[in-house]
Amino acid sequence: MEALHGKWKLDKSKNINVEEFLTAQGYPQDLVAQVSASEGTFEATPDNGKTRVVITSSGQPSTSHLVTLDEPFQLSTPEGIVLTCKCTLEGQGRFREHYSNAAQGVEFTTVREVKGKTMKTETTAKGGCMTQVFNKV
């Protein structure tokens, strides 16, 4: 996961289909507007053989998780839904995160691809997709 290590800042000008995707997933319009307007960072650092991931988004509390490739872990969304996540390496600088909660009917996948100082993320669920770009800071 070394390619992800460092701090990455969201470049909102490169967002594609974020509002449409969140609306299609059933998020209330006030939350869609909040997410669309928020500034965010993704930070990954080594931590005793694992990777600590800290995600910040303006208007939301930051989240922190210890991640090991191919080992499922649980996290909670800001809405209180508990998800199981599993991260896998798909190739040099390309990672797949699968999130699910069968009881809540939630399932989506985020693919992160690092090329130089740019990380592109594509999140797909229920036939929809959104793209975001983060720049290394």
Image: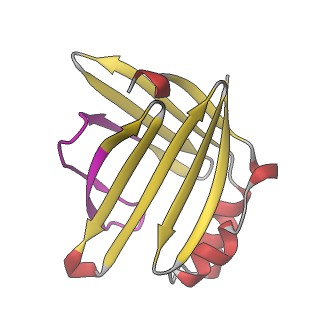
Left or right: 37 as drawn, with respect to 51: right
Residue at 51 percent of width and 84 percent of height:
26
Specify the quadrant that holds the C terminus: top right
Q: As rendered, which of 42 and 89 lies closer to the eye?
A: 89
Q: As rendered, which of 98 and 55 lies closer to the eye?
A: 98
Q: Main secondary structure of the magenta part?
A: strand
Q: As rendered, which of 55 and 79 lies closer to the eye?
A: 55
Which residue appears farthest toward the front when viewing the image?
91
Which percent across, then down, holds residue 49?
22, 18
Colouring scheme, one of rainbow, by chain, secondary structure, one colour: secondary structure
Q: Which residues are magenta?
A: 63-87
Left or right: 66 as drawn, with respect to 78: left
Task: Determine whether 89 is above or below 137 in the image.
Answer: below
Left or right: 71 as drawn, with respect to 132: left
Say whether residue 137 is magenta: no
Which residue appears farthest toward the right when viewing the image?
13
Specify the quadrant that holds the N terminus: top left
Say whether residue 77 is magenta: yes
Answer with the quarter of the image where residue 89 lies.
Answer: top left
Task: Determine whether 16 is above or below 127 in the image.
Answer: above
Which percent across, then down, holds residue 52?
34, 28
Which percent across, then down, holds residue 18?
66, 66
Task: Determine whether 58 is above or below 21 in the image.
Answer: above
Which percent across, then down, holds residue 77?
38, 60
Left or right: 9 as drawn, with respect to 65: right
Residue at 67 percent of width and 77 percent of height:
20
Residue at 69 percent of width and 46 percent of height:
39
Counting every numbered tag in the picture gives 0
